[in-house]
Image (cartoon, helix red, strand yellow):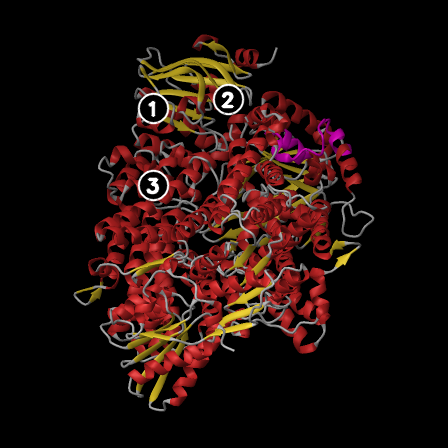
Amino acid sequence: MSQIRTAALPALARVPGVAIVLVALLVGFSLAGPRFLTPANIANILMQSTVLILLALPMTLIIMTEGLDLSMGAVLTLASIALAMTVVATGSPALGFLAGLAVGLGFGLANGALVALIGIPPFIATLGTLGIAQGLALAVTDGQSVVGIPPSIERVYSGTLFAVPIPIIIGAAAYALGHLLLYHTRFGAAVFALGGNREALRLAGASDRAMLIVVYAVGGLMAGFAALLMTARMNSAHPTAGIGLEFDAIAAVAVGGTSFERGNGWLFGTLLGVVAVGVLRNGLNLLAVPSSAQVACIGALVILALFIDALRSRP
Amino acid sequence: MKTIVSLAALVVLAGQVLAGPALAANETIAVFTKNQTNPYFQAVRVGSETAAKSLGAKVIQYIPTKPDSIPEQLSQVEDVIVKKPDAILFIPVDYKALVPAVEKINAAGIPVTNITDRIAGGKLVAYVGADDYNIGLATARHLLKQMGGKGNVVILEGVKGSLTNTDRVRGFNDALKENSGVKLLASQPANYQRLNALQVMENLIQSFPQIDGVLAANDPMAVGALEALDGANRKALVVGINGSKEAVEMIKAGRLLASGDFNGFIQGCLGVEIAIRNLRKEQTPKEIILKPVVIEKSNFQAYEAPVEQRTCPKLSDMVTN
Amino acid sequence: MSQMAETRPRLALSRDVLQAFYRLLAAALLCAALALASDAFLTLGNILNVLRQTALLFLMASGLTLVILTAGLDLSVGANIGLSACLAASVIQATGSAGLGVATGIGCGALIGICNGALVAWLRIPSFIATYGMMWMLTGVTYYYMAGETIHGFPPSFRQFGSGYLLGVPIPVYVMVLFLGIGTLFAQRTIWGQQIYALGANPEATRLSGVPVERRLLLVYTFSGAMAGLASLIILARINSAQGDIGEELTLPAIAAVLIGGTSLFGGSGSVSGTLIGALILTLVLNGMNLLQINASWQPLATGLIILLAVGIDTITRRTAP
Amino acid sequence: MSAESHSAAPLFALQGISKQFPGVRALDDVSFDIRAGETHMLLGENGAGKSTLMKILCGAYRPDAGAFLVSGEPVSVITPADARRLGIAVIFQEFTLVPYLDIAHNVFLGREFPGRIPGLIDRGRLYRETRRVLDTIGFDIDPRLPVHRLGVAQQQMVEIAKALSQDARILVMDEPTAALSERETERLFAMIARLKARGVAIVYISHRLAEVFALGDRITVLRDGRKVASVLAAQTTPDELVRLMVGRSIDTTYGRHFCDSPGDLALEVKGISADSGISDVSLTVRAGEIVGLAGLVGSGRSEVARAIFGADRITAGEIRMFGAPMDGSPQDSARRGMALIPENRKTQGLALARSVGDNIVLAGLRKMFRSGIFSPRRATEAAQAVIERLRIATPSPRRTVGFLSGGNQQKVVVGKWLNAGARFFIFDEPTRGIDVGAKAEIFKLIDGLAREGAAILMISSEQSEIVHVCDRAYVMRAGRIAGELARQQLTEANIVRLGMHQ
C-alpha cells in the first residue's frame, strides 16, 4: 500500500514546508526594503541565531529518540551563571567555561538518567529539572545579574576570525559536527534506532539506555556551551536570560520537519527552522512592524510550515 | 515555486500593511521598552509619541515579543542598528545585561538617551528617571504616618534583582527604621504581578491575624493585596507605587491610601524631547531625576486625565540641577 | 505482545487505584509536614484559602486533562486565558452585565479551543506545535487589543464569582467541585468519555470502530478552551482587573498538575480527580513556602523536585509493584 | 541429507532450560539442539514458549535453569554479544529495522566499520559490503534507500541480509512468510535451500503445516512451555503434529456448513476506485454467504476492505448496503451494521492498553446507550455476554486486552462488532499470527455468524483457507478484480491462475 502511494508522489512535492517558507521570507523581505539583503544584516541574523542553533541541534537528536528536553533554557541560564560566577571569583575564563560545561553536562546526565534509568517520561523529567535549574539560578543570584566578566569572554561573541564573526563560525562548526555525529558515526545510527526501533539497537548489542543518556548529556553539554555565547553576548549572566528558549528550539526542530515519532529527523531542516524564525524577526523589525503583530506572525509561521508539511503528507 | 511566490507576495504586503503609512517626519527615534503588558511602559510610549508629535519627529516602538526577554532586546537593538534611526530612547530590560547593547549603539554612532532603569555602562546623551529610593521612602513614610507610627506591616516586593525593586524596597525599609513602633511581619516577592500578590497576600493573612499596613512595590500588587484583604474581610492601609490610572481611581474611591508617582508619561516625554533637541544641536541636560511625589487623597485630581490626553511638561521646568 | 502476555496477570484497575492512593498519601504527607511546621496551616481560613487557590489551577488543568487523555497537549491554555479575560473584561465594562461577560469569556475560550481542535484533528498538525503556534497568535492578538493598558473595576455581582463566599466557603471552590463532578461524569459516565479514552489509547482502532475521532478531538479541545475561558473569569473576578499578561506562566503549572495527577502523556489513562490531587499538591507547595516565609526564588526548585518525586515514585512503583 | 546432519555433533544445544516470569512458567525443562545444515522447525501454539525459547537462544533473556552447549562445550551465560559471536542471528516477526536509516546502516547496525578518522564510520566500505551481502541473496536494490520506503518482503530481505552479514551459522526465523506473497515465499524457500547447502542451520517457526513439511528436516513441538516431541519430518504427518501441538485432534478442513441458498443482497460494490491503488472494483455479498477476497499480497485486497468500510475515501463508484448507498465514513458504516476486523489487530483493531470490556463495547456505545449516558454495569454485562458467547479466555472483562493471546484478541475484535449488532463483516486476514487450534475456532465463529444470517467478506493469503471456508471468492490482481470463482470452481489452482501476473 505504502509503495503504491510514495511512487505516485512527484519529487517536487517533497520540498519541505520550512524551505518554502524560508525562501518566501527571504524573497519577500528583500523586495520590501533595501536594508535586509546586506552582508551586515545577514551576518546579524546568523549571529542572533547561534545560541538557538546550539540548542536546536541537540534538541533534534533528543526529539528523534521520541524524547524532549524542556530544561535546556534553564540549564543554559544556570550554566551561564556558573560561568560568570567562576570567572568573577577566579579570574580564569577557562575555569568559567569549564564550570558552565560541567553544569550543562551534569543536568544532561541527570535528565538522561531520569529518562533512561528510572523511566520517567522525558516531558515530565525535564519539566522537573527545568524547575530545579531555574530555582537554583534565581536562588544563587538572588535575581541579580552577575557582572565583572573580563573582556576575553565578550570577544567570543563580538570578535571575528578571518573577518567572519566568531558566533557564525561556532554555529557552522556545531552544525558540521552535528551532521558528522548523526550521519557518520555509530552514535548517530543509534539515535535513529532509539526513536525508530529500540529493540534493533538492543539486539545489535548496544545499550539503548547508555545511548539515551548520552543523547541527553549532549543536549546538556551544548546548553553549557551555548551559555558561553549567551554570557559573552550580554557580558554578564542573568537568571532569567534563557527562559523559554527550549520552546523556541523545539518549535524550530518541528518547523524544520523533524517529526516526534519513529526517529524521523532532519538536521538541516532544524538549521532552516532556526534561520527562518531569525529572518522573520529581523525582517519584521526592519519593517518596524508593531510588536503585537510580530508575536502573531511567529505563531503563524510555525503553523504555516507544519500545515504545508501536513498537506504534503496526505494521500 | 508558485507557493513561494505567493507567500513572498504575502510577506511584502503584510509588511507594508502592518508597518502602516510612513510619516513625513524629520527625525526617527527608536523607543525601546520592556514589555507590552505593563501600563507603565504604555505610558512611556504615549509620552514619547506625544513629545515627538509636538516636535515634528517620528517614533518607532520596539518591544520584545516575549516580555522582559534579554536576548530578544539584544537582537532588536542589533536589528535597529541596521535600520539606523536618528536616535534611540532606551529602557533596558536589565540594566547590566544590556550594557553590550548600548556599547553597540555607541559604536554605530547613534545617540542614545536612557530612561527609567539607569544602564550600568555605555555613553549616554542623558538619563531621565525617577528616584526609586526616595519614592519608596516617601510613600512608606506617608503610610506610616497614617498608621500613627505603630502597627504591623508587610512588604510585597517586585521582581527580585530589578533595579526599581531593589531601590523601592530599600526606601520602604529605611522608612520603617525611622518608626520603631512598626513591626515588619514579612517581606515577600510577588513579582510585580497582581495574581501573585493576591495569592501571597491570602497566604500571609492566614499567618498573621493582625496586619495594619501593606507596602507594595507597585500598584498591581497593591491592588491584588487589597482584593485579598477584601476577600478575607480584613482591613489594612495599602500603598503602591506607579500612580497608575487604576490606583488613582482607587485613591479617589478611598480604597487605596496612596501611590508613589512613578511617571512613565513624563519620562517618555522628556526622553524623546532630549533626544530630539540633542539631534538639533540644542542644549540639553545630562540628567533629570524626577522629584518624588506621593499621590493621595489631597492631590489625585491632577492625575485623573488619561495619558493620551495629557500634555508633556516643559523640559526647562523639570531640570532639577 | 508476547512479553506482555508473560508479565503477571493482575487487574490493571487495582494498580491504578493503588497509584491514586499513593498520590493522596503524598498530598496528606505534605499537609502533615506543613501542619507541623506552621501553626497557621491547619486553620479553617488557610484550608479554604488553599482550596480557593487550588480551584483556579484545577479549572485550567481539568480541560487539559481530557486533551492529554487523547495523547495531545494544549500549550495555548495560558494565552487563551489572557485573551478570554481581556475580552470578557471589556464586555463587562462596556455593558455592566456580568452575564454577558461570562458568556464572552467562556465563548472566546471555546472558540479558541475549536481552532486548536481544527488544527489538530483536520489539519493533522501535532498538537504540541499547533497549540504552540496558537499561543503566539493569541498573545499577539491580546497585546494588540490591550495596547499595554489594563481594564479594572467590575460590578460586585461579577466579583462574587471569584471572591465571594457561600455558607462560609469560597465560591470558586463550589465551581471546582461542580466541574470535578462534571469532568468525572463526562469521562467515566458518558459514551463520549469512553470514546476519548479509547482514542487516546489507539486513535486508528477507535476510528475503525466507527467513532468520529475528529469530532471527538474537536470536542476535547473545545472543552479545554472553554475551561480556560472559565478559569479566566475566575481570575478576572478575583483580581478585579485584566492585563495582557494575565495568563502568562499559567500553562506549565497546569500541565504539571495534570501529570502529577497521574494522567499519562501517552494518552488513554488518567482521570480528572487525579488532576485535582495534582493541583492540590502544587498549591500546597506554594502555600507552605509563603507560610514558612521561604524565599520565593526557591519555588521553581521545590516545584521541580515535587514533580520528579511524584512521577518518579509513580514510575518506580509501576515497574516493581504488581 | 538429513541423515548426514544428524550424525554430526550439534552446533549449539540448550539443555533443561527453564524460565519463569511473574505468574507464568514460560519454559519448563526444555532441551533443544541445532545441527549444521539442517532446518529445525519449531512448532507450538501462541504462549507455548516459542518466543521465550528464541529470546534465550539469542541472549535477550537469561534462563533460570539449564545449560548451553556450544559445539559440545558447556557455556554458563549467553549475552546478545555472545550469541552474535557464536553466529546466531534472529529474524523476528516484528522486524528489528530502523525505519529512517538506510539499508546499509540497518544491515550493519552496531557493527559499522570504523573509518580512518577515529569515531567516524567508513561509509564507502559500509555500502560496498552491503552491496556484496545483498548480491549473495540476489536482492537488487540501492543500499542507500531508507527502510521505511520498502515493502514488507523487501524489509524481510534486509533482515536476512543483516543476519548473513554477521556470518550467521544459525539463522532463526519467526513465521517469515506471514506477510509474504506466494512468489516471495518461493524465493525465500529457494534462499533457505541455498543457505542450508552452505552449512547454515535454520530454526524455523511456523504455523503453516505445508511449510513445515516443505522445509523441515526435524520438528520440535512445544506446548505450555514443555517440549512435547522432537521428530524427523519424514516420520510424521500433519494430523500427528496438530495433535501434538493442541493436545487433541482438529479438523483442518474446518467443517464448514456451506450456504446453498444465500439471502438478500447485503453489500453491493459498483466500480469503486481509490487513491490507495484500487480501481473499478465491483463485488456483491449476500446474507448468509462467506465470500472470499483472494490475491497476492499487495494486490489491493486490504485497500478494497478499507474503501468499503469508509476508512479510505473512494474516488469513483458506489457502495450500497442492504440497498441503501453508504456515505463513505467509518461512522456511517459502523452505525449501519458493517464491521471491519482489520489485518493488524494491534495497531488497527484494539486499544491494547484498555480492558477487554472497554474494547468490546467501543463500537456499540451509541447503540447501547442511546441517551449518551454510559453505565459501567451494563457495559460489563454486555462484555460478559460476548466473552461467554465467543468463549474468550480472560479472567474478567477488566483484564487489559494486551495480555490476551492472539486468538483471544481476535475474538475481542469480533466481539466488539457482535456487540454493536453488525450484520456484515469484513475479515481481513483473520488468522494472521493465530495458532492452529485458535484458527479452527475463529473459522467456526465465522461460520456461525454466516449461519445466523450475517454476510461475510473474508480476505486471506492462504488459499486453502479460502477454498475450505468460502462459498465463492473474488481474486484480485494489481488493484482490480481479476475474476470471480463460484463454489464449484474454487480451487487453489484457480486462485493462483487468476492472481498471478500474466
| Residue occupied by mark 2 | D275
Chain of the residue displaying label 1: D
Out of D440 and C317, give the one closest to the viewer. C317
How far apart marks 1 and 3 lie (CA) works out to 36 Å
Disc 1 + disc 3, Cβ < 8 Å: no
Q: Is residue C35 left or right of residue B269?
A: left
Residue C70 lies in what quarter of the image? top left
Out of D63 and D244, give the one closest to the viewer. D63
Residue D82 in view of the camera = no
Neighbour tally class for label 3: few under 14, some 14-19, many 20 plus, Cα within 10 Å: many
Chain of the residue displaying label 2: D
| Residue occupied by mark 3 | C219
| Residue occupied by mark 1 | D449
Chain of the residue displaying label 3: C
Q: Is residue B7 left or right of residue D353?
A: right
How far apart marks 1 and 2 lie (CA) works out to 32 Å
Q: Is residue A294 left or right of residue D361?
A: right
Residue D379 in view of the camera = yes
- Label of residue A151 in the image: none
Number of numbered discs present? Answer: 3
* Badge 1 or badge 2: first in the primary sequence: 2
